[in-house]
Amino acid sequence: MDFVGAYSSGNISYLLKGFLVTLEVAFISIILSFVIGSLLGIFRYAKIPVFSKIVAVLVEAIRNLPLILIIFFTYFALPEVGIKMGVMTAAIAALTIFESAMISEIVRSGLNSIEKGQIEASRSSGLNYVQTMWHIILPQALKRMIPPLVSQFISLLKDTSLAVIIALPELLRNAQGIYSGPKGGNQIIPIIIMVALMYFVVNYALSLLSRALEKRLDTTHKKDKGRNKFQGNNQEVLPSNLS
């Protein structure tokens, strides 16, 4: 195994170039899928007649398809009906379509986890449905959705490697270009180790972020619970003292 040759400045630079493409595709796909997936999840939660059922059918259909099939569809099938996209655009479109369906389920589950009584209380206080969702339900649901959303974003970053099948010049594609060269026979393992390390660093950082956010939210919940208990004890003690 030629570790010295594999980790030459030229190879590292080439891998980093591919990794930047991976991060760019992942970042754009995360933003788009979060926005679209959130809207789809809210539409399903709102149970709009007919429309919500159509959204549910589309979401379930996409969720039960392999991502690689969606990538093939966006890059090879859509041009047959006049929709032509570049490699990067096709990869982003496929990832956005697939991840939007996944995120919509996370959003819908998060909204369903909020007690229905809060909606009734908000409506009775004079807030309309949109105001109730924006000011009361969504802020609470978002806190509960953060850990699964981060996990889904980690999966999205790893799924960018599937775009190698349409020759997207991302990290894995560039790695193949190195160890498939005339001098790359002894560099396969070192290159794969480096690729794995790059993926690991970013994904592990996201995992730590998810754990920190989850711990912080749990801590906040415990503090609120303790504060309410303390206030309840005071309410029980004060009347007896006054008497």
Image (cartoon, rainbow, N blue to C red):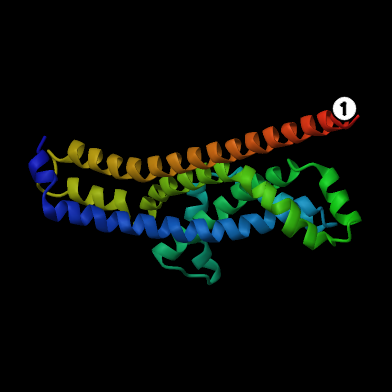
Q: Position of 204 compared to 184: left or right? A: right
Q: Nearer the viewer, residue 28 or 82?
A: 28
Crowdedness near tag 1: few (<14), some (14–19) or many (≥20) residues, C-alpha within 10 Å: few
> Hey, which quadrant is residue 124 in on the image?
bottom right
| Residue 142 seen by the camera | yes
Residue 120 vs 227, above or below: the answer is below
Q: Position of 99 compared to 158: left or right? A: right
Assign the C terminus to one quadrant of the image. Answer: top right
Q: Residue at x 60, y 36 (%)?
A: 218
Pointer 1 residue: 240
Q: Amino acid at mark 1?
A: Ser
From the top left corner, tell me how far across and down residue 162 is, in percent: 41, 48
From the top left corner, tell me how far across and down residue 199 is, in percent: 34, 44
Q: Residue at x 69, y 43 (%)?
A: 109
Q: Nearer the viewer, residue 93 or 80?
A: 93
Q: Residue at x 72, y 50 (%)?
A: 57
| Residue 169 seen by the camera | no
Asked which secondary structure carries label 1, the reply is helix
From the top left corner, tell me how far across and down residue 19 is, in percent: 31, 54
How many discs appear?
A: 1
Q: Residue at x 46, y 68 (%)?
A: 85
Q: Position of 237 compared to 147: left or right? A: right
Q: Nearer the viewer, residue 45 or 119?
A: 119
Q: Position of 224 compared to 190: left or right? A: right
From the top left corner, tell me how far across and down residue 211 is, in percent: 49, 37
